Image (cartoon, rainbow, N blue to C red):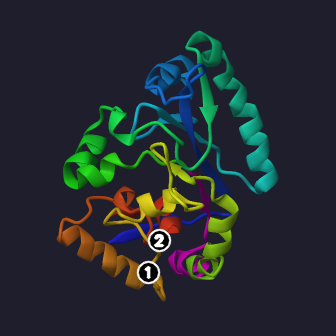
Amino acid sequence: MLEFKKNDPPFSLGVEWELQVVDQHTGHLTPKALTILEDINDPHFVKELFQSTLEINTDVCADVQAVEENFLQLLPLLEPAKEAYRVRYATTGTHPFSHFMERLVTPTPRYYDMIDRNQWIARRMAVYGLHVHVGARSGDHCIALKNFFLRFVPHLIALSASSPFWSGILTGLSSSRLTMYESLPTAGFPYDFQNWKAFEALIQSLIRSKSIQTLKDLCGICAQAQNMARLN
């Protein structure tokens, strides 16, 4: 079963920000994230699927102002690497001209398994985003929040669209990232759950069918639930 991890107080925020690591001269993605992370040695900075990506995680914050303050404290830690390794950081949804097939996978069992299961689809996931996790009082409250925010998905996509290019091609899309991401079997528009029990039933079905192993394998079914529950 899924045990809900209650957040007290509710509506706390945790934000994950994925950054591209690019060569300062060519602008191409460069696989130096692991070296940078080793130098920083701070748990707020973590590796991602590809070695040209790093992620900044905030603490659990009470409000948006606290999130901003947290990022302002963390971002300076990236500065020394800029000159040491001749890199810069970018935040668009996709890199405009680096090719996804040139990306090096971060050597962890989870990422190797992801590539093994999804092959070419997973190798295209050189995409970048900012993820906001919202605390909830209960499982049903989590689902209610998810259902509420669904109506704002078009607005959020419009506001965040920043990926018209894909591997040097002008796609004609404002967000090619969205098209890349929704190709994953566990991604796409969230389902219309009415309560936590319905969400739990789907998760158990996905596990039994070996479609997923853990909640981390989900990309879009119920993003709010990923950090609020654990398998028991």
Q: Residue furthest bottom?
A: 194
Q: Quadrant of residue 6?
A: bottom right
Which x, y percent locates residue 94?
52, 47
Q: Is residue 147 above or below residue 72?
A: below
The circle on residue 191 is: 1
Residues in magenta? 129-145
Label 2 SS: loop
Badge count: 2
Marks 1 and 2, how far apart at CA = 7 Å
Q: Nearer the viewer, residue 143 or 93?
A: 93
Can residue 143 be seen from the camera position used here? yes
Q: Decide whether residue 108 is among the magenta residues.
A: no
Label 1 SS: loop
**Mark 2, residue position:** 222
On screen, residue 220 versus residue 149, left or right, reads left
Q: Is residue 111 above or below residue 205?
A: above
The circle on residue 136 is: none
Give the amino acid at mark 2: Cys
Sequence-first disc among 1 and 2: 1
Q: Decide whether residue 140 is among the magenta residues.
A: yes
Which x, y percent locates residue 24?
60, 21
Q: Quadrant of residue 78?
A: top right
Can residue 10 be seen from the camera position used here? no
Q: Residues within 10 Å of mark 1 (few under 14, many from 20)?
A: some
Give the amino acid at mark 1: Tyr
Q: Residue furthest top?
A: 84
Q: Residue furthest right?
A: 65
Q: Is residue 137 above or below residue 213?
A: below
Q: Residue at x 50, y 39 (%)?
A: 97
* 1 and 2 marks in contact (CB < 8 Å): yes
Which x, y percent locates residue 210?
19, 65
